[in-house]
Every structure is written in C-alpha cells, then in structure tokens.
Image (tube, rainbow, N blue to C red):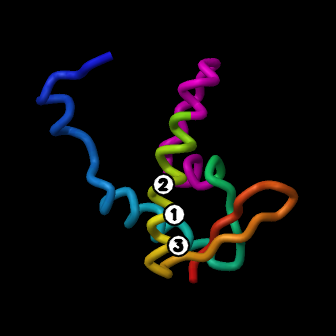
Amino acid sequence: MPIEIDEFNKGKHDQEVQKEILDFLRANRTNAFTVEEILEGIGHLKSTDDLPLMLMQSISYSIILGQLVKDRRIKSKIIDYKNYYMIQ
C-alpha cells in the first residue's frame, strides 16, 4: 500500500538503522544474534500474524546486516541453518 511523502520522510535512513544495530551489538559484544533477535533488541520487531510481512521485514534487515558484514563492521556465521551476527 503506497504512503504519502510526509510519512516517507518520517522514516529512518539505512545509516540510522546501521548505527542502532552496531550500538546493540557493541553493548552485547559477547553474544551473537539472529536477525529476529537483533530486531527485537533494537525495538524494530513488528509482532504480527502476517507471515509474508514478517518475512519481508527479516529480508529488509538482512540486507542492512549484509552491508555491515561486507563493510567488515560485523561478522556472520551460519549455525544450525541460522545466520548469527556479532560485532567485529
């Protein structure tokens, strides 16, 4: 569903979300987290019964996490078929 420009302008830039993720991971540097755990930790987890929406949310944040991995600001490993992330 489309949104108006005013609502769009209230949104966060990727860099703002990256900073929130980095702050969360730095504060919890002895642990690794899944995408969903990171979303919960930064207060961005939208609880819903809408599975496609939850999947899209995870994918969107996975893209941001992937950029942080590419920039070598965080590291990622797959454990039991789940991606885990932690501060570099």
Assign the N terminus to one quadrant of the image: top left
Assign the C terminus to one quadrant of the image: bottom right
Query: Which residue type does callout 1 highlight?
Result: Gly
Q: CA distance from mark 3 to mark 2?
A: 10 Å
Find disc 1 in the rendering and name its residue.
Answer: 66
**Residue name at image x 23 percent, y 22 percent:** 3
In the displayed structure, 27 sits above or below 18; it is below
| Relative horizontal placement of residue 76, taking residue 21 as reference (left or right) | right
The disc at residue 35 is: none
Q: Position of residue 27 (x, y in %)?
A: 55, 73
Magenta-drawn stretch contains 68: no
Query: Which residue type does callout 2 highlight?
Result: Ile
Q: CA distance from mark 1 to mark 2?
A: 5 Å
Label count reads 3
Q: Quadrant of residue 52?
A: top right
Find disc 2 in the rendering and name its residue.
Answer: 63
Q: Is label 1 in contact with label 2 (beta carbons under 8 Å)?
A: yes
Q: CA distance from mark 1 to mark 3?
A: 5 Å
Q: Earlier in the sequence, mark 3 or mark 2?
A: 2
| Relative horizontal placement of residue 82, taking residue 5 as reference (left or right) | right
The disc at residue 69 is: 3
The residue carrying pointer 2 sits among few (fewer than 14), some (14 to 19) or many (20 or more) residues within 10 Å by Cα, namely: few
Q: Secondary structure at mark 3?
A: helix
Q: Secondary structure at mark 2?
A: helix
**Residue name at image x 40 percent, y 63 percent:** 18
The residue carrying pointer 3 sits among few (fewer than 14), some (14 to 19) or many (20 or more) residues within 10 Å by Cα, namely: some
In the displayed structure, 55 sits above or below 52; it is below
**Residue name at image x 72 percent, y 70 percent:** 77
